[in-house]
Image (spheres, rainbow, N blue to C red):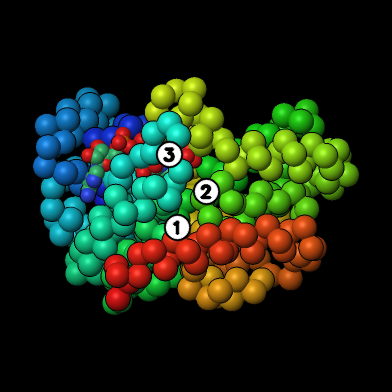
Amino acid sequence: MKNPVRVAVTGAAGQISYSLLFRIASGDMLGKDQPVILQLLEITPAMDALRGVVMELEDCAFPLLAGVVISDKPEEAFAQADYALLVGARPRGPGMERKDLLEANAAIFSVQGKALNAVASRQVKVLVVGNPANTNALIAQRNAPDLDPRNFTAMTRLDHNRALAQLAGKTGAATTDIRQMIIWGNHSATQYPDISQATVKGDAAAALVPRDWYETDFIPTVQQRGAAIIKARGASSAASAAGSAIDHIRDWALGTPDGDWVSMAVPSDGSYGIEKGLIYSFPVTCKNGDYTIVQGLDIDTFSRERMTVTERELQEERDGVAHLLP
Ligand SMILES: NC(=O)c1ccc[n+]([C@@H]2O[C@H](COP(=O)([O-])OP(=O)(O)OC[C@H]3O[C@@H](n4cnc5c(N)ncnc54)[C@H](O)[C@@H]3O)[C@@H](O)[C@H]2O)c1
Ligand SMILES: O=C(O)C[C@H](O)C(=O)O
């Protein structure tokens, strides 16, 4: 049996965590041979609710669950953490844009970045789910100067999976028939879901669907899917967000399949002309616990315009939280 790894999760009594924690503990994220210790962070008023979640975790008798720690102090929850899933933040309600959350949530990620810097494993892999996820990841990263800045990522896998589902529905294919989908940029309504490289059963996706559907239906549907779920459910996506967080960490830790890639928001290294340092979603392959931005893709004018719009939004968000970026 492998040694247990430490997985810290914030917002552990919230909606997303109510799905996420049970899937981590069952081995869906790190493999069926990898024991885990869950280190759960909540705000003080939610600690009773969190105790109830822990009772349910115990009652599942998961063979891989090697321990559970709960705390309302980031320095305790992040101690020696190998993975940190930063979920805890206020979700948006009906009619709100993600940028409305910037002020409300940014301070949380400054505090948590400092705590990770102080006590987490030096190799900790960080996934930010709490919105606005890309800019929150930037805030956490910049407040953790002793950790590898490349290990701070944000979640656009949900958008990637949404794009797979929409294209599969339109073409009558299975999501597993589709390769090389891309989400560029911000996890927001400016994101650019790009099918120009995608294939369905080996055929170019762009040739299988009408251009008009792609531009006026597919792109806005994927961009607005979070809002559509909030309108329908009265609460933001939870089980699907948890599923995508599992997918993001699993592929980062265990690797992407040959011949395919996934979308992750990672610190830009200047690839495709995107400003260095922004946490921007790119197509990436993963191997040996590391990711590599896919290089050499052709970018046409249509794509470039959309990649720039979402880059500008990230620059504006970053400038809006300059006081939290040491
Ligand atoms: N990136 C994505 O694709 C994606 C998808 C869905 C939701 N989200 C975002 O994820 C976040 C969580 O969503 P949810 O539905 O679970 O919300 P929720 O309100 O059900 O749960 C959030 C939890 O975080 C806790 N929390 C707040 N501040 C905290 C802090 N400083 N430290 C620790 N915990 C704290 C709250 O007490 C609450 O229990 C929201 O910001 C939401 O917008 C992101
Ligand atoms: O859209 C939201 O605010 C929630 C989440 O980010 C989503 O995409 O479902």
Q: In which quarter of the image is residue 49?
A: top left
Residue at image point 77% right, 58% down: 302
- The three-letter amino acid code for the residue at tag 2 is Ser
In percent of width and height, residue 225 lies at 56, 35
- Identify the residue under disc 1: 134
- Identify the residue under disc 2: 188
Residue 30 visible at all: no
Residue at image point 64% right, 52% down: 192
Please determine whether, in this image, residue 255 is positioned above or below residue 176: below
- The three-letter amino acid code for the residue at tag 1 is Asn
Q: Quadrant of the C terminus?
A: bottom left
| Pick the front one: 244 or 100 | 100
Disc 2 packing (10 Å; few <14; some 14–19; many ≥20): many
In percent of width and height, residue 86 lies at 32, 51
- Identify the residue under disc 3: 96
Label located before the other in sequence (1 or 2): 1
Label located before the other in sequence (3 or 2): 3
Give the Cα distance between marks 1 and 2: 9 Å
Element under label 3?
loop
Residue reaching furthest to the right: 207
Q: Are marks 1 and 2 in contact (CB under 8 Å)?
A: yes
